[in-house]
Amino acid sequence: MQLDLNLLTALDALLEEGSVAGAAARLHVTAPAMSRSLGRIRKATGDQILVRTGRSMVPTTRALAMRAQVHTLVQQAQQLLSAQQEIELASLERVFTVRWHDTLTAACGSALITAVRRQAPGVRLRLSAEPGTDDTELRRGEVDLESGSGAPTLPDIRHHLVGTDRLTVTVRPGHPLIEEPLTVERYAAAEHLTVSRRGSLHSPIDDALAHRGLERHVVAAGPTAAFALQLALDSDLVVTLPDAVTRTARERLGLVTLPLPLPLPEVPLHLLWHQRYDDDRAHTWLRKLATDTVRSLFAAPTAP
């Protein structure tokens, strides 16, 4: 059956106004055009819809029964096809999955949850461990917002840069490296711990050292920055991590931070999402809130 959905709008106006002339004026069409629409509605429904009683028209029993449903359908269609309205954060109910690197979650997770709860108490956050560089979950809609050090290569993955971080050296109080100025040679000769979910013992730091004819003594790899910092506190292992996102954790453990004696580019931090959320008002709100929260890290004074 071919059904012109415009007839729903005409039917809604007819049932609300109770006359062809009133419905025509409401929809800014001529009375003959509205009369033709009523004829098509009668044919489609098999019901008279409006019948004449004296000088006025009254709805039939079936028309009365369908009036509320027709009005609801027309309103839903208008909302569906019209431009998005401003969201009401106080009544917003939604679950967002945020997949960030563990250092970023540790540094900003609490602040983000607090900010979300303050503005939209019905919103829930699912903070997920970052499994790697695979963007499949972003494309499938299983992850709403992700962090990464590199810009995405897929055209449907959006991103923006929220800050850049520098690498710093972290050791326990009383560590031998603190006794004298830290040279690149002393740095390379120390025992190091890398941070890698895949257990890699190599990083771009080793490439930079190799260009200088040096080799870093890496003795172990840890899965998370939190693990690495705790191990640095309990041993003579040296950990090299981004400064801003680990500052709070280092200060909490009482660790000592030293400048990296090796010129390396700063580490960029991007927030990534799928293009399906470009015009999603609630997602746009979350992105802005997350961006402001993360950027507050880089506004803080950098540790010497």
Image (spheres, grey):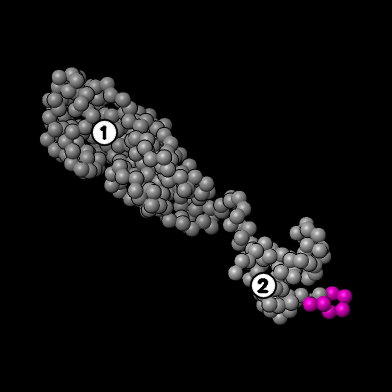
Write down the residue under mark 2.
44
Q: Position of residue 104 (x, y in %)?
A: 34, 41
Whether residue 101 appears in this view of the structure is: yes
Give the overall secondary structure of the magenta segment. strand
Q: Could you say which quadrant of the image residue 228 lies in? A: top left
Q: Is residue 271 above or below residue 184?
A: below
Q: Quadrant of the N terminus?
A: bottom right
Q: Earlier in the sequence, mark 2 or mark 1?
A: 2
Report the residue at 40% width, 46% height from top.
145
Report the residue at 70% width, 77% height from top.
47
Q: Identify the residue at the far right of this view.
A: 55
The kind of residue on which mark 1 rests is: Leu
Q: Are the residues flagged by discs 2 and 1 in contact, CB closer than 8 Å?
A: no
Q: Is residue 122 above or below residue 166?
A: below
Relative horizontal placement of residue 83, taking residue 222 as reference (left or right): right
The kind of residue on which mark 2 rests is: Ala
Write down the residue under mark 1.
241
Report the residue at 68% width, 77% height from top.
46
Relative horizontal placement of residue 25, taking residue 93 as reference (left or right): right
Report the residue at 78% width, 71% height from top.
18
Question: Quick one: 174 or 204, which is closer to the camera?
Answer: 204
Q: Quadrant of the C terminus?
A: top left
Question: Quick one: 161 or 44, which is closer to the camera?
Answer: 44
Q: Secondary structure at mark 1?
A: strand
